[in-house]
Amino acid sequence: MKTLAILAVSILLTSFSLPPKSVKFQYFFKVDDQYDWVQVTNQTIKQSIMGMDQVVENTVKASILLKVSALTSNGAKLEARYVSMSMSMKLPAGMGSQDLDSNGDQEKLENKVMKALTDKPFTITITKQGKIESIDGEENLWSDFSSLGLNNEQLSAMKSTLEQNLSEGSLKTSFQMVLTSYPENPIKPGEQWKNKLGAGSSFPLETENTWSIAKIEGETANLSAIGVTSTTDKTKVVSLPNNIKSTFDLAGEQKVTSAVNVKTAWPTQVTINSEIKGNMNLLAGGMIPTDLAVPMSIVTTSNFTVTKK
């Protein structure tokens, strides 16, 4: 009888359990609200050239200040400016390393270049659902370059390298990775939504993310996404440094975990892990005597913290 009583109570409690609560995620914007954005990205690139493995390790750190500068009919305009930025590159054995730091010794040209990129405002236009519609004014980032004392060739080379991360397309992708694009309809744990994100640069890569709510605790929703990355155009020719041209055939997976505020939809902590593999196909010309397939892999881990001031 005791067992039957326990079973009866369990069934009774289960029958009255509430279904998962639906949440309509929508960004809250208020003019003059400010957010500190901190990024740390570590990346390892492995390539096999004519049987010889080469490894490049990159670290990017950035601090960005976001300010809601104006409201729009369906979202807001955010003023963004880099507070600090550093890039470190460890080249294959015997080739040394490169370090650029906006807070480093300003007697070093590479640090001076990074410093010139800071405190240059540009605008992010975003909807209440988190879709970034445009990046404007990013050319502002280069406004102090002419005063650095570099000749035209040096300026062009330096800008070409940095633009891989700071072009309009690259910036849009970088911010969209963290500022999740939510569905129009309410969503609850167990349900999914999808969105696609291009590489944002000249590389013909696209990631399709499948999002879901892992759990909701108080005012925090823990989101997760599995992304499938593929090459959208395996015949597209991409220009690389030293006048080298190449096509790419890469594929891989990306995993995202994001803690967001249920009331404001703003993220607080985001981690992104990705790995893509395949071939970089160097095309004959210049210093490349014949077409050359280079097997490669790119493993990237990024951590972001977004804090309302």
Image (cartoon, rainbow, N blue to C red):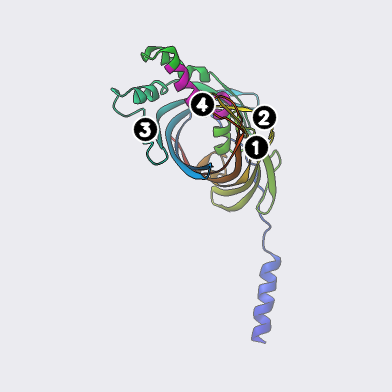
Q: Secondary structure at mark 2?
A: loop
Query: At 44% from the left edge and 12% from the top edge, which residue is drawn?
Result: 152
Give 280 or 29, whichever is nearer the viewer.
280
* Image location (x, y in percent) of residue 80: 49, 26
As drawn, the residue found furthest toward the front would be 289
Q: Are marks 1 and 2 in contact (CB under 8 Å)?
A: no
Counting other residues with Cα less than 10 Å from the Cα at mark 4, is it few (<14), some (14-19), or many (20 or more)? few
The residue at 42%/40% (across/down) is 92
Which sits earlier in the primary sequence, circle 2 or circle 4?
A: 2
Q: Report the residue marked by disc 3.
A: 99
Tell me the magenta residue range.
154-171
Going by the numbered disc 2, the residue's amino acid type is: Lys
**Tag 4–tag 1 contact (CB < 8 Å):** no
> 149 or 120, which is in the foreground?
149
Crowding around mark 1 (Cα neighbors within 10 Å: few <14, some 14 to 19, many 20+) is: some
Residue indicated by mark 4 = 241
Q: Tell me if residue 159 can be seen.
A: yes
> Within the magenta stretch, is there residue 157?
yes
In the image, is residue 175 above or below residue 45?
above
CA gap between label 2 and label 3 equals 31 Å
Which is closer to the viewer, label 2 or label 3? 2
Instruction: Name the foreground residue: 180 vs 147.
Output: 147
Nearer-N-terminus badge (4/1): 1
Which element type, helix, strand or loop, lies under badge 1?
strand
**In the depicted structure, whether residue 306 falls above or below residue 284:** below
- Say what amino acid the circle numbered 4 marks: Pro
Q: What's the mark number on residue 206?
A: 1
| Percent x, y of residue 241 | 51, 26
